[in-house]
Image: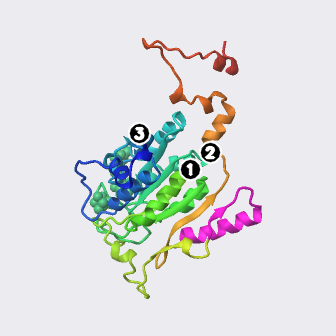
Amino acid sequence: MATATLDRRQALKQFRVDYANDWCAGCGDFGILGALQQALAGMGLMPHQVVLVGGIGCSGKTQYYVNCYGVHTLHGRPLPFATGIKLANPELTVIIVAGDGDGLGIGAGHFVNAGRRNVDLAYLLFNNEVYGLTQGQGAPTLQLGLQTRSLVEPNIQESVNGPSLAYASGFTWIGRGYSYDVRHLVSMITRAVRHPGLSFLDIVQPCPTYNDLHDKAWFGGAGTDSGDPRIYDVEATDYDGRIPAGADAGDYRAKVAAFSQKALEWGDRIPVGLLLERQGVTSFGDRVGGRLQPYRTQPPAARVIADESGRPTADLSAAFDESGVD
Ligand SMILES: Cc1ncc(C[n+]2csc(CCOP(=O)(O)OP(=O)(O)O)c2C)c(N)n1
Ligand code: SF4
Ligand SMILES: [Mg+2]
């Protein structure tokens, strides 16, 4: 059925599944799941146009709970899978759903190198500061000295700042959302997906089972002098993280300096919203298309590679000629 013929409720329903979900009651993952389904429906996408690529973790089960294509990859490896899927079939909307351990621990090398390529993907990082699935070890986003429920002693390692690493690696869109503010998160996921390049959405996601320090009450302002919510919308202030294409070096540096402050702001105030957008950077698909002429009109997924009997039909002579192989 064409999207245009569906009302909002029907559009959302087509991304829902009717089988059991085994996340713990009250987990922040539920807010992300609901926001993701709403965002996909709101963009007018159909399930066959979307691929969710999950890592390993509680977060890595998300693709089972959305009715669309999904791949459950190895721990830390969703980015290489997603890169291949997008390059093979650029028409697909490809979204990574992965934990902070998956993306910034074991998968950190892929994270950095994906940034260099600026593939048109959206990376949704489920940031709960713990390894939820394996019972609460400290994740790379857990700050030095914090002791969450499963740790026998306070965390002995420094944390990784996801937005800063994303910028340093080359991600061209960097934002943050909060899993218990679903309305705002829908808009952030939508913007991350629509960005024509690699986007990183740091989603602050309480894990009520293993992260007993940063729970809903803490994000809501418990323990601050003012009692105000820690989470605030940075775009409701005079902060503007957009860097237009062709910005001069001085403007660029000023934007990045302001971004660095926001990226590191964590404690009594935690900004959500768009933190940085480098506009007009070519995507990896554009670069490949500029080099391999048939790619734009005939990406791998659109090519006929075998006849009806399964015999290969690919003509590799041009590639051999170009490479000088006889
Ligand atoms: C190669 C490999 N090493 C370790 C593991 C064990 N393991 C499974 S999930 C996980 C961490 C999950 O944490 P995170 O990515 O933060 O996801 P969350 O469960 O918090 O959503 C680990 C270490 C594994 N599955 N594969
Ligand atoms: S362990 Fe934590 S992250 Fe995993 S499902 Fe339970 S509450 Fe959610
Ligand atoms: Mg985690």
The reply to whether the C-beta atoms of the residues labelled 3 and 1 are less than 8 Å apart is no
Residue under numbered circle 1: 198
Disc 2 marks a residue whose amino acid type is Ser
Residue under numbered circle 2: 283
Q: Residue at x 69, y 35 (%)?
A: 290
Quadrant of the rendering where the N terminus is positioned: top left
Q: CA distance from mark 3 to mark 1?
A: 21 Å
Between residue 206 and residue 88, name the one nearer to us.
88
The reply to whether the C-beta atoms of the residues labelled 1 and 2 are less than 8 Å apart is yes
SS for dot 3: helix
Q: Position of residue 310 (x, y in %)?
A: 43, 14
Majority secondary structure of magenta residues: helix
Disc 1 marks a residue whose amino acid type is Leu
Q: Residue at x 22, y 50 (%)?
A: 20
Figure check: 133 above or below 77: below
Residue under numbered circle 3: 48
Q: Earlier in the sequence, mark 1 or mark 2?
A: 1
Q: Position of residue 278 (x, y in %)?
A: 64, 57
